Amino acid sequence: LNIRLLYFASLREALGDGGGALELPPAVRTVGELRAHLAARGDNWGRIAAGGNVRCAVNQQMVADGALLTEGAEVAFFPPVTGG
Amino acid sequence: MFSVTVQSEDFDPGVEIGRLQGTRSDIGAVASFVGLVRDSHEGRVVRTMTLEHYPGMTEKSLQAIVDEARARWPLLGARVIHRVGPLAVGSRIVLVVVASAHRGAAFAACEFIMDYLKTRAPFWKHEDTPEGGRWVDARETDDAAAARWQY
């Protein structure tokens, strides 16, 4: 499964990464599994782990950790929003 | 007319209100809200505010919020404009204008749209202060304000 990752705001700065294409191992099929997969990179990537304060959107819709990832999905991680 | 726009340019609230009314004679009430960049936040001086957003999702989420307001109140028009990029103190950040036959729906929908925008639309504020830059933290009071509408 191939997805495209995006990171925003303070999370993007902390990771020093604006995102990009990623091929997922077969065991990673949900948002929760992707969180664990990315958090395993260590350091600030741990912020993405479930239970933290980082939100996820798949194809530009906010989703919960049980959401399934699909081929070509656009997956964004970001801190709680502060517009208005 | 129901429309949302994300833009770096400033807007004129009076012009937007006039456009929303147009030549219609069934509108009896227009409520509006303008959000501005304040000169301080949590005791710190703010020099500039920069708004980051998630292009694409931002517009979709604003449209979805307006659609939800239309499902709840008999609205005759709504206009949402949110600015992005660097904004000086005193600048307008956001405009919400709602038109309806009577004031009750206009007031309520205007507040609803702002409460949902603050907690659901993917914008992030970054403040430039004399002590350096910092990202603005989300406020629990904003979550509480949005939760009021879940009945």
Image (tube, rainbow, N blue to C red):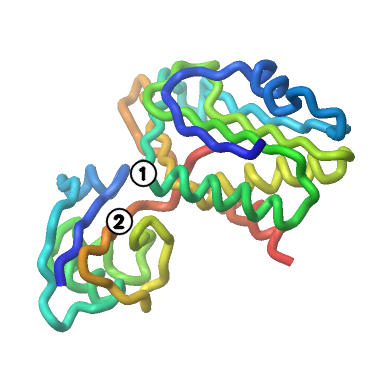
Question: Position of B78 compared to B94: left or right?
Answer: right
Measured as percent of width and height from the top left, residue B120 is found at 51, 52
Measured as percent of width and height from the top left, residue B129 is found at 38, 23
Q: Dot 2: what SS? A: strand
Label 1 is found on which chain of the structure?
Answer: B
Which residue is pictured at 50% across the width and 33% down the height?
B5
CB contact under 8 Å: marks 2 and 1: yes
Report the number of numbered marks.
2
Q: Which residue is mark 1?
A: B54
Quarter placement of the C terminus of chain A: top right
Measured as percent of width and height from the top left, residue A83 is found at 49, 39
For residue A4, above or below residue B39: below
Image disc number at residue A76: 2
Residues at marks 2 and 1, CA–CA distance in whole angstroms: 9 Å
Amino acid carrying label 1: it is Tyr
Amino acid carrying label 2: it is Ala
Question: Position of B72 compared to B137: left or right?
Answer: right
Name the quadrant containing residue B100: top right
